[in-house]
Amino acid sequence: MDGKRLNVGCGTDIKKGWVNLDSATVHGVDVVHDIEQLPLPFPDGSFDEILAQDVLEHIDYPRVLKDLHRILKADGMLNIRVPHFTSKNNFVDPTHRKLFSVSTFDFFIRGVKLKEKRAYYFDFTFARATDCRITFEHSSRWFFYNRFMDTIINRSPAAQRFYESTGLSRIFPAENIIITLQK
């Protein structure tokens, strides 16, 4: 294994060779800790890679992102998966508290210029996003057109923003946003 890796909010998705953290005492969880109880029980710069998959939508995430930033090593990667704001899963799961756009994480990336960005809100930034994708449901033959949408929408950040800003996102709702932030 190259480096130390943390699987935040792992639930039953236990990853071998990773430190698996969750608030529930589930078989395979290495560290039982509520991620909203900060600081997390790790020293600064502990991890090369952190996975936060299907967890940030359940919490007040800016404070948690700051602490994940703290425990990442320099150049470390934070891999995130959250539901897109058009996802039906936002409304099915009563524990979802937040909605996400591809522009949401721009607030936490150094040098991104947004008209509505207020850099003074946060005292930490990631160096860059190395990947950002909007995903679409492919699990049913009824959603055959989503493969086409996936290809077209993820051609560029401009295409993603056009999709979100127009009726396309309401006609063809997305499933998730997958993004990697590098410290």
Image: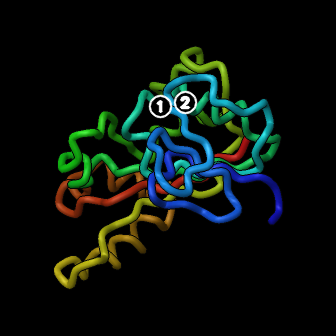
Asked if residue 115 is positioned above or below residue 81 in the image, the reply reads: above
Q: Position of residue 40 (x, y in %)?
A: 63, 30
Q: Nearer the viewer, residue 99 or 22?
A: 22
Q: Does 46 sit left or right of 152 as displayed?
A: right
Asked if residue 52 is positioned above or below residue 58 in the image, the reply reads: below
Helix, strand, or loop for circle 2? helix
Q: Position of residue 46 (x, y in %)?
A: 78, 40
Helix, strand, or loop for circle 1? helix
Q: Residue 64's mark?
A: 2
Contact (CB < 8 A) between labels 1 and 2?
yes
Q: Does 136 sit left or right of 129 as displayed?
A: left
- The residue type indicated by label 2 comes to Val
Asked if residue 41 is positioned above or below residue 46 in the image, the reply reads: above
Q: Does 24 sit left or right of 129 as displayed?
A: left
Residue at the (54%, 53%) spot, across then down? 179
Q: CA distance from mark 1 to mark 2?
A: 5 Å
Residue 158: in sight, yes or no? no
- The residue type indicated by label 1 comes to Tyr
Residue at the (52%, 39%) spot, across then down? 105
Asked if residue 29 is positioned above or below residue 41 in the image, the reply reads: below
Residue 70: in sight, yes or no? yes
Q: Quadrant of the C terminus?
A: top right
Residue at the (54%, 31%) spot, across then down? 107
- Circle 1 sits on which residue? 61
Q: Based on the displayed image, in which of its 4 quarters is residue 56 positioned?
A: top left
